[in-house]
Image (cartoon, helix red, strand yellow):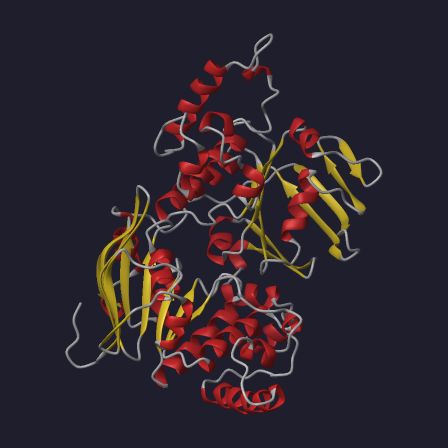
Amino acid sequence: MTNNTVPFAIELRDISKRFGAVQANKDICLQVPAGTIHGIIGENGAGKSTLMSIIYGFYEADTGFIEVDGKRVDIRSSQDAIDAGIGMVHQHFMLVENFSVLENVVLGTEGGALLKGGMAAARVELQRLAKEYSLDIDVDAIVEELPVGLQQRVEILKALYRGARILILDEPTGVLTPQEADHLFRILKSLKEQGVTVLLITHKLREIMASTDNISVMRQGEMVAHRETQHTNTEELAELMVGKKVRLTVNKDEAQPSDVFLSAKNLTQFDSQGVKRLKEVSLELRAGEILGIAGVSGNGQSELLNVLSGITPMSEGEIQFAGQTITAKAPKDAAQMRDLKMAHVPEDRHKMGLVTGFEAYEAAILGYHNSSAYNGKILMNHKAMLDECHVRMADWDVRPPNPHLKTANFSGGNQQKIVIAREVEQNPDVLLIGQPTRGVDIGAIENIHEQIVKLRDSGKAILLVSVELDEIMALSDRILVMFDGAVVGELDAKDADERTLGLMMANAYNKEEQGASA
């Protein structure tokens, strides 16, 4: 990729990095013109994060070198990166929540003979930066009281305050509503107009297409393609990422819902600190439908899954399921809910879905290990476990198809297939599934979506929680929206659009006003 008129803000030459037997980056070359927004895309495990960590000084490259503004730089630490004019906004914010915006921005860079003098100068500079880059924010606000979108602005201001002319953003929209994401991209455009160079790492191809000037594609640790955004499309990018053609849409017929399999009434849950996490949530889930739960992460979806699955006891309310009435005084734990034919794919497969030290055939029966299918008179029936794991790996395209491989050694997508296959193959009446494609490669997403629709079409009831609006809209038949622990709206999926869902997710939707504006 060459450009003879615009200088390169950053150039990577033959960057390689190995972790033991794993070649994370191999001979990476990249040229990013100054004052542009440059997208970096690739499947999970393609080497994107390692490469960004090298640029920002978390890792040192084994071979190769970096040039900034045409001059070679040695980046051995994050401070070296900052000194070179490179800033990074991490996917998980690095903020002290009970500090003010100003205190967070100056943390680690305090100056002046007296701290007060340094803070006064910092306040003036911060207000200047906020105005120049359209990052309006109250510098005295406490960070934990700010919505997520404004917290992200604090991270951007931190980088700019430290003199960043090259800004790396890692999956910046993962915790934002669509409206907040749109505002972020307006901010990035403003940064670009002021001469800042932006490196944008995301798996959301539509965002890449809408916001970047150029795109580089990584696959299996190598840089495999560079494209000008205006001369490519999502289909080509997906194929470059995976190495084969990928269908980006979900094929499904209209749902044929029937009996109510599960109903919940006024579910309420308090955490250990007495904070009300679930607020009188009521819903009905029918056979033959996918009920999607939309919302920005942290608005009660996780608590809802945990209460429905029996992992966390409810504080108030009731659940009707499989002829049973479940209440705070008459609870059912997760094992009992499984016995009633409820399956659960947890949001975090590592914390709750797998024991990564187990071999695949062992992980494939977790939670169901007491079943007679896997037990002999005295010992577990390892042959039955292995035989079943072989079949599931073939049916679900788990790679490599090795039941004896440690679960930790599978990619994220293949780990997820192991978990989903384990739950689906138990033939549950109700499947609770959280973030089914989080950290999953595009090729694996296609397969997982197909299996979820197939389960629905077999007459099962599915409750789907996802922060990915595209996924919610593509898979769901009905959609509930949660905000601050409560259900704030319901839509038929065919009537849903990103704008309406985004307003609901921010609890800013007024049906009468929207009708009048239409």
Q: Left or right of 435: which side holds 235? A: left
Which residue is most to the front? 113
Residue 416 picture location, percent across and down: 46, 40
Residue beneath the point at 61% across and 71% down: 147
Depth order, front residue of 119/129: 119
Q: Left or right of 507: which side holds 16? A: left
Which residue is most to the right? 329
Q: How many marks?
A: 0
Q: Quadrant of the C terminus?
A: bottom right
Residue beneath the point at 37% across and 59% down: 59
Q: Quadrant of the N terminus?
A: bottom left
Residue 303 picture location, percent across and down: 67, 49
Query: Which quarter of the picture shows residue 188?
Result: bottom left
Q: Is residue 441 above or below residue 99?
A: above
Residue 75 picture location, percent across and down: 33, 67
Depth order, front residue of 188/71: 71
Q: Left or right of 422: which side holds 216? A: left
Q: Is residue 329 above or below residue 133?
A: above
Residue 511 picture location, percent across and down: 64, 69
Which residue is most to the top? 377
Residue beneath the point at 48% across and 69% down: 181
